[in-house]
Amino acid sequence: MKINRGQTLVEIIIAVGIIVVVFVGCLSLAAMTIKIGRITKEKNQALNLVQEGIEGIRNIRDTYWLDEDKGADKDARWTTFLNDFSGDVNIEYDETEGKWKKKTEIDTGCIGDECFKEIIDGKEFQRTISITDTNPSDPLNKKKVSVTVSWDNGSQTTAAVSQLTNWVGINEPSGEPLPSSVNCSFSEDPYLLNPGADDPVSPRINIDSSGYPHVTFVRYPKSASSNIGYVYKTGSGWQSLPNAEGSTKNILVAPFLLNPVNDNPYVAWIGLPRGNMDTMFTKWDPSANGGAGGWTKADGTLDRNEIYGFDNVSDNNSYSRRVPLFIFTDLSADRNPRIIWIDGGEVLYSSYDLGVWSEPDCISDGSCIPVSVNSIPTFKNDLNNDKVVIAWNAWENDGYNVHYASSNHSLGSWSVEIIDADSYKPSVDIDSSGNSHISYLKKVGGFYRCFYTKWTGSEWTAPITVYTESSGNPINDNKIEIDSFGNPHIFINEGIDMYHTKWTGSEWTTPVNISGTVDLMTMPTTLDYIIKFDSNGMPHVIFRRDTTEGCDLFYTRFISDGWTEPCKIVGVNNDYASRPWDMTMDSNNDIHVVYKDYSTNELFYGSFSTN
């Protein structure tokens, strides 16, 4: 056979060329991957230096307050601090003395007038700090701290801005709510929801697609087992559904859902079907009982004398406290229900798919070993981004740690991580891009602080302090909520007061006391509060607190110039075992409230317009 050697040589050359191109491409890709990794690593190092600069300045300010040599009182020591630290400054950590202090020697070769140089893995970083007035009319009590870190001869930079206040000497954060400019009187007389002799607890309220309220609660009749009551409003008035369950002792109802397709309710609660605490579920099906309607299992079947049905989701065999915290749905056409609850020291999850409830999944610990979850977890369900997230804190290794878990609605597995150690009471929300934002509490340098961090899509930002205790009382609680513009708001409960701060897009606002001049009892109490945002992205808050007149509900809102003075809605009871009230807001920005009158054991509903 005759061989065309010229053609074979051409093929070899082409093959070698292809191999060379592929090899060079692989080398280029590897080089690019290494470069991206290096850039990411350097950026993280720079962010750590920025956060270190902000926290270092705060630490020095706190140290000045404790140093009697800096002045006769804390106001004088604040003034001394401002005299020593203004304009362009820099700091360093003295290993010998074990504290932060002003850097007296300027590093040579700095790009700016004042900088601090640090070599990390052979890379030189330069940090500059500037302290300037944030409010020219009040230069003594507020300062702006700007920290910039540069590297690669100034071609790469990252920066952050924070506020510094004289909260000890001048009782910052300051800012009184505005005089009352809102009316929170009910538009009609409160409607009695439970005529009769039963004792209602754990009321929950929701709004259907037509703007009408639905309310569920636990009934405690004097001569029968407790049951789940359900009432709702229509264009012709209030209606009621048959009791959801009446043969077991029911204790607490979780926030319920209305199926957005047909407004049929899904309800979860704690029950004792066999003397053991279990997480129960039922849903309303108008086609059940021959078209008469009824409460059924998730699969639509009945099992209690063929009148109603319910699912025992946890199916617990011991008397451990199972508290249903959240009930939510996925994106499927059936809106499959999913429930998260606490069992002792564990956070558990179960979903209804393919006709059955899944075996409870231990989110907080895959082996279901109790890790002492010591606070109510916070949770967000983001249907737009097919995501569910939850945050909680647990006792581990002689300290409380903030944990975070996320999963998509296919829920093949949960991704769990620790956000910060020696910290507690996290709160979580999700922005429109599907990124989580977390606030939590931590004691640093002898002071209780509220920290904030967010997921950027690839990493968590360095935690920053958004609030430091102002009255010497521990911070009791915090909640983070994101408005329609994507800006996070954080509400902090310290002692008997509530503070609010928000991200403006460039910095956090000075925390403002929004609880007003309510005549309070002398003993500190933890505020019970609910936050809703209106169609303009403005927050509205209803909170309950002890006053000299009793335990009352108050309402305040944010308008263009600040927070209104709280107005009293109604008096409620002192039963802290379960929330005796709930609220929500409809698409017209009207507030709907359900509450219990403790003196008569009656449950009422009322609403008012915020427009």
Image: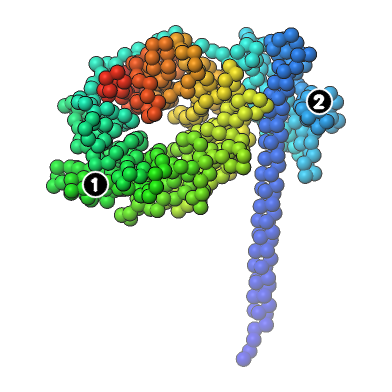
Q: Is residue 9 above or below residue 442?
A: below
Left or right: 407, with 114 as reference point: left
What secondary structure is found at the residue carrying circle 2?
loop
Q: What residue type is disc 2 on?
A: Lys
The structure residue drawn at horizontal position 76% and vertical position 27%, both measured from the top left corner, is: 100
Q: Residue at x 77, y 44 (%)?
A: 121
Q: Position of residue 10 (x, y in %)?
A: 66, 75
At a point 69% along the width and 44% down the height, the residue shown is: 41
Could you tell me residue 487's position as x and y percent?
Answer: 50, 29
Q: Crowding at label 2, few (<14), some or many (≥20) Cα neighbours within 10 Å?
A: some
Q: Residue at x 62, y 29 (%)?
A: 443
Q: Secondary structure at mark 1?
A: loop
Residue matched to label 2:
103
How far, Cα to Cα, is label 2 from label 1? Answer: 72 Å
Q: Quadrant of residue 123?
A: top right
The amino acid sitting under disc 1 is Gly
Q: Which residue is mark 1?
A: 309
